[in-house]
Amino acid sequence: MRKIKKGDDVIVIAGKDKGRRGTVLRVVDDARVLVENINIARKHLKANPQVGEPGGIVDKAMPIQVSNVALYNPQKDGPDRVGFKILEDGRKVRVFKSNGEVVDV
């Protein structure tokens, strides 16, 4: 089970976008995630007239290291660490370390 999943609300805790908040669009691999409107790079595209694609400069979200993001805790109104807990019914869920609140509903 991963600590950060697709659809999670995260805060960047290190790097050029430190302090910004976004939603995880995709988990690229164990070490990288793609967060909307975070780590934007300008990409130069060559036109392809056969397909009808225009050329130009576009903004593209690039993956960011998982260690540079933390899950957003609405109760704390800030980033928080994540741990795991097994409930009485046998389910394994993610919990916030600061207050023990369950992340997965």
Image (spheres, rainbow, N blue to C red):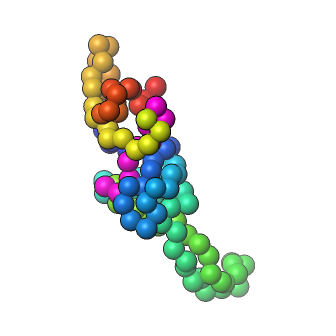
**Residue 15 screen position, x and y as percent:** 38, 65
**Left or right, residue 16 beside residue 58:** left
**Left or right, residue 14 beside residue 48:** left
Residue toward you, 64 or 78: 78
Q: Is residue 8 above or below residue 16?
A: above
Please say whether residue 100 is one of the residues in the magenta stretch.
Answer: no
**Residue 59 screen position, x and y as percent:** 59, 72
Magenta span covers which residues? 67-75
**Left or right, residue 74 beside residue 55:** left
Task: Give the residue displayed 66% in from the left and 84% down from the top.
Answer: 55
- Residue 48 in view: no
Q: Is residue 93 above or below residue 39?
A: above
Task: Give the residue displayed 55% in from the left and 77% down from the top.
Answer: 42
Looking at this view, name the residue that lies furthest to the top: 88
Residue toward you, 59 or 22: 22
**Residue 53 screen position, x and y as percent:** 69, 78
Quarter of the image where the N terminus is located = top left
- Residue 30 in view: yes
Task: Give the residue displayed 32% in from the left and 32% down from the top.
Answer: 98
Task: Give the residue displayed 51% in from the left and 51% down from the top.
Answer: 21
| Number of numbered labels in the structure image | 0
Q: Is residue 91 above or below residue 8?
A: above
Residue toward you, 56 or 22: 22
